[in-house]
Image: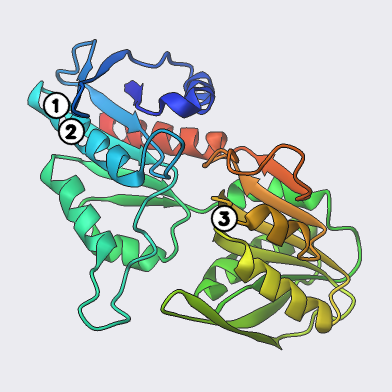
Amino acid sequence: MLLFSLDQANRAFAEALGRELDITLAPHEERSFEDGERKLRPLVDPRGEDVYVLLGLHGDREESPHDKLLKLWMFIATLRDHGARRVTAVVPYLAYARKDRRTKPYDPLGLRVVAQLFESVGTAQIIVLEVHNPAALENAFRIPAVHLESRHALQSAVLGSLGSGLLAIASPDPGGVKRAQLWREDLEHALRRPVGFALVDKRRSAGLLGGGDLVAGSVDGATVVLFDDLISSGETLRRAASALRRAGAARLIACAAHGLFMGEAADILANAGLDEVIVTDSVPAFRLPAGHRVPLQVTTCVPILAQALRDSHTSWTA
């Protein structure tokens, strides 16, 4: 097995993954030219190898999602050109996963286009953490798409905050119902007690949020785990938290796989009435300013990524 990391800004994450797998990151060269073009090449021979390439596709201070996508595609193509027998893209955060269906005339299907380009460069499979719609992910890719559910990384961080009183899982929008229900089942099994369920109404049109006043399900007096795939501006969580408080929720713990924290997220989340905000380290929380007041806890998704790589490599070599 060879593991490359193309994310220089989040080297610590890649090194932690390597330690979990008990392997050293494979070296590669990356050069930038004056006009912005780049050259990437492996510095070890990939011929006949089972190769994994790690790169989260969130924008950061240095690179946009578009920069990262092209870099990843070109590196995978290079590995295949030089004889890698199988190349797996390991993508903790997948760009364009939210654009999985048409909601307006002439809309693009961004997820499908991204999938086609991964396939075109010879990617054998892709491993991703918690996308917006797992069914859409599976339908977009014709290669195996391994979807890792973030609740397996979040649960240990949440258990210590739940107490012994009433407990419920809530989805902040209709699209997250299945995600929340699956975690509800896991928590009932782990805690051996009932866990309620609630849904907050939300609608989005032309980038504007609507709804957020209606709560289906009982949360009166309960600790509520509000579970979403990602946090962008924080406005969805703010609206959901307000509705759940009005419905009687005693405590609110917001959980998400990916913390993007765009725009005014620090102020919105600090004033959203949330007791805790828990995210994984799939995306570094670099956009939150020093001294922010968000009650944030970051838990690692490295162990579940590492297990997915081990399982993949074992099945391939068996």
Q: Going by the image, does 165 lie left or right of 121? A: right
* Circle 1 residue: 78
The image quarter containing residue 241 is: bottom right
Q: Is residue 159 visible?
A: yes
Graded by Cα atoms within 10 Å as few (under 14), some (14 to 19) or many (20 or more), the crowding at tag 1 reads some
* Picture disc at residue 162: none
Name the residue rendered at 71%, 37% in the picture. Answer: 290
Q: Amino acid at mark 2?
A: Met
Graded by Cα atoms within 10 Å as few (under 14), some (14 to 19) or many (20 or more), the crowding at tag 2 reads some
Q: Amino acid at mark 1?
A: Thr
* Picture disc at residue 263: 3
* Circle 2 residue: 74
Tell us which disc is closer to us: 1 or 3.
3
Tell us which disc is closer to us: 3 or 2.
3
Front in this rendered view, residue 2 or 41: 41
Dots 2 and 1: beta carbons under 8 Å? yes
Name the residue rendered at 26%, 44% in the picture. Answer: 125
Q: CA distance from mark 2 to mark 1?
A: 6 Å
Front in this rendered view, residue 313 or 53: 53
Name the residue rendered at 24%, 10% in the picture. Answer: 43
